[in-house]
Image (cartoon, rainbow, N blue to C red):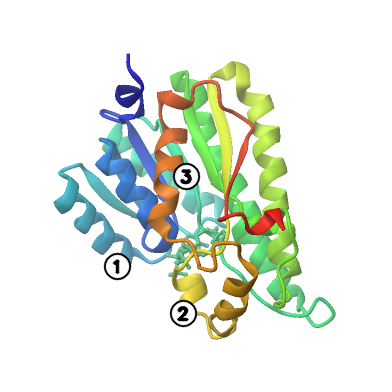
């Protein structure tokens, strides 16, 4: 099979958490364009339904919307059951839902800390664990977690210690699962984006004013676009990446190089 064929995802079944908007939506779109049926999982069902409808119309693939809060184990388990009922199997699982809260470490409330860790780290574990069980049973699959360049550097000027710690945790969780599940046919990788223009950055009252500053600091002097993460997502979802597991892919326009 040639490399272009291996990059295709025809017949594969995938889901993306935080898939209603931003990076997750862009990844879901790319998976469907490459031939996969995709479940859009999000806490916001109305927005997931809109996204699933749009992707199905544009790509001709089956796209379903599933509501789940990734911090709630029962909801995550129910979400996996729904996807299995609709699709019969899960070949690629994108654990992507995440939030950022900015607060100086000395003032960060316990609730703020817990919320970030619950969604960004525990949510990834619960989702990967539930998908991993299915993949082990079916004899293979690919899990892709969204980490961040914040796992590698400390962003400035905004204080975001919980976010940075949660994302460093995602990378080590990714490596741990990759090693545990290597011989069970389940590959686990993560993507670490730099600053990307999404609701999380463009519509955040605390982060939006900092964009000019980040652009000054960045070798490419601009934010990334969600679609600039699509190719790595399609590669990691399918058979082209069969020897790739336990890896973290930094896609940041060289931000972390300086
Ligand atoms: P967005 O805020 O645009 O999208 C995130 C989506 O996740 C939203 O639809 C949100 O729903 C959903 N979500 C939030 N909490 C939960 C939850 N508990 N359960 C299920 N879904 C939830 O963010 P991005 O697309 O920018 O970010 C996606 C991922 O990429 C995150 O993990 C983020 O940390 C990471 N990332 C983003 C970067 C950036 O610069 N944008 C850089 C590096 C990493 P709702 O809006 O309704 O809350």
Seen in the image, is 150 located left or right of residue 31?
right
Image point 15% across, 44% down: which residue?
60
Q: Is residue 198 above or below residue 147?
A: below
Of residues 196 and 238, the one drawn nearer to the viewer in this rendering: 196
Residue matched to label 1: 46
Q: Secondary structure at mark 3?
A: strand
**From this viewpoint, is residue 105 visible?**
yes
Number of residues whose C-alpha sits closer than 10 Å to that of mark 2, classed few (under 14), some (14–19) or many (20 or more):
few
Q: Secondary structure at mark 2?
A: loop
Residue matched to label 3: 94
**From this viewpoint, is residue 41 visible?**
no
Q: Position of residue 108 (x, y in %)?
A: 77, 78
Image point 20% across, 57% down: which residue?
53
Q: Position of residue 6 (x, y in %)?
A: 35, 23
Image point 38% across, 63% down: which residue?
21
Image point 42% across, 58% down: which residue?
226
* First of labels 3, 2 by sequence position: 3
Gap between marks 2 and 1 measured at Cα:
19 Å
Of residues 46 and 216, the one drawn nearer to the viewer in this rendering: 216
Of residues 58 and 116, the one drawn nearer to the viewer in this rendering: 58
The image quadrant that residue 117 belongs to is bottom right
The image quadrant that residue 98 belongs to is bottom right
* First of labels 1, 3 by sequence position: 1
Marks 2,1: beta carbons within 8 A: no
Q: Position of residue 255 (x, y in %)?
A: 63, 59
Residue matched to label 2: 203
Marks 1,3: beta carbons within 8 A: no
Q: Position of residue 161 (x, y in %)?
A: 76, 68
Q: Is residue 244 above or below residue 232?
A: above
């Amino acid at each position: 099979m040639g490399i272009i064929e291996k990059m295709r995802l025809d017949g594969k079944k995938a889901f993306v958490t935080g898939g209603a908007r931003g990076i997750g939506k862009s990844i879901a779109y790319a998976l469907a364009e490459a031939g996969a049926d995709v479940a859009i999982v999000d806490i916001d069902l109305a927005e997931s339904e809109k996204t699933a409808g749009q992707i199905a119309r544009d790509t001709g693939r089956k796209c379903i919307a599933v509501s789940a809060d990734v911090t709630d184990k029962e909801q995550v388990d129910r979400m996996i059951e729904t996807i299995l009922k609709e699709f019969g199997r899960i070949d690629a699982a994108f654990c992507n839902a995440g939030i950022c809260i900015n607060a100086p470490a000395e003032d960060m409330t316990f609730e703020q800390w817990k919320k970030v860790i619950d969604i960004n780290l525990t949510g990834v574990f619960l989702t990967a664990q539930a998908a991993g069980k299915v993949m082990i049973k079916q004899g293979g699959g690919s899990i892709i977690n969204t980490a961040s360049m914040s796992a590698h550097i400390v962003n400035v000027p905004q204080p975001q210690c919980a976010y940075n710690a949660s994302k460093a945790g995602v990378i080590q969780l990714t490596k741990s699962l990759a090693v545990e599940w290597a011989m069970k046919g389940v590959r686990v990788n993560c993507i670490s984006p730099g600053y990307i223009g999404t609701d999380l950055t463009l519509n955040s009252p605390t982060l939006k004013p900092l964009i000019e500053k980040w652009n000054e600091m960045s070798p490419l002097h601009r934010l990334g676009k969600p679609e600039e993460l699509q190719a790595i997502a399609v590669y990691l979802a399918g058979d082209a990446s069969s020897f790739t597991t336990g890896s973290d892919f930094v896609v940041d326009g060289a931000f972390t190089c300086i």
